[in-house]
C-alpha cells in the first residue's frame, strides 16, 4: 500500500464516522422535536449536560462519549437501544 492509498483509507473512515455522528445528531434532534421541547426547556436545571453540548451533539460536531449517550437517552426518556436504533456501526471499506 502506498502513501496515497493509506491517506484515502483514513479519509474514508473519517467521513464514515462523521456521517454516523450527523445521523445520530439528526435522530436526537428529531426525538427532541417529537416531544415538542426546545433545547433550553430540555436541559433547563440539569447539571450533567448543557444546551451548548446538546446543540453540538445534534449538529454532529462532537464525538459523544458513551456516558453522554446514556444521559441523552435518559433526558429523552428512552433506552439507549432506542436512541441508537438506526445508527450504522459498520466500518468496512465496501
Image (cartoon, helix red, strand yellow):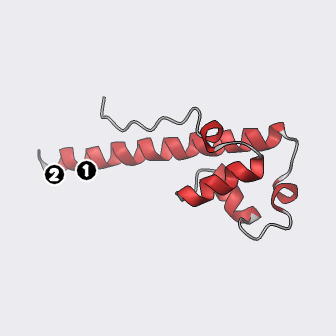
Tally of marks? 2
The residue that label 1 is drawn on is: 7
Residue placed furthest toward the top:
94
Secondary structure under badge 1?
helix
| Residue 57: x %, y % from top left | 63, 54
Q: In the picture, which quadrant includes the N terminus? A: top left
Image vertical order of residue 7 relative to residue 48, above or below:
above
Secondary structure under badge 2?
helix
Residue 27 visible in the picture: yes
| Residue 53: x %, y % from top left | 67, 63
Residue occupying the point 74% across, 66% down: 50
Dividing the picture into quarters, in which one does residue 85 lie? top right
Horizontal side of residue 33 vs 9, given as left or right = right
The residue that label 2 is drawn on is: 3
| Residue 41: x %, y % from top left | 88, 56
Q: Nearer the viewer, residue 45 or 56?
A: 45
Residue occupying the point 81% across, 60% down: 43
| Residue 13: x %, y % from top left | 36, 45
Residue occupying the point 48% across, 35% down: 88
Dividing the picture into quarters, in which one does residue 94 lie? top left
Q: Nearer the viewer, residue 47 or 91?
A: 47
Amino acid at each position: 500500500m502506498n502513501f496515497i492509498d493509506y491517506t484515502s483509507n483514513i479519509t474514508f473512515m473519517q467521513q464514515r464516522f462523521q456521517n454516523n455522528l450527523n445521523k445520530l445528531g439528526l435522530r436526537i434532534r428529531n426525538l427532541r422535536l417529537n416531544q415538542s421541547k426546545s433545547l433550553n426547556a430540555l436541559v433547563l436545571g440539569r447539571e450533567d449536560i448543557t444546551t451548548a453540548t446538546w446543540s453540538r451533539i445534534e449538529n454532529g460536531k462532537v464525538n459523544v462519549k458513551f456516558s453522554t449517550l446514556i444521559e441523552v437517552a435518559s433526558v429523552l426518556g428512552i433506552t439507549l437501544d432506542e436512541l441508537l436504533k438506526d445508527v450504522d456501526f459498520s466500518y468496512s471499506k465496501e
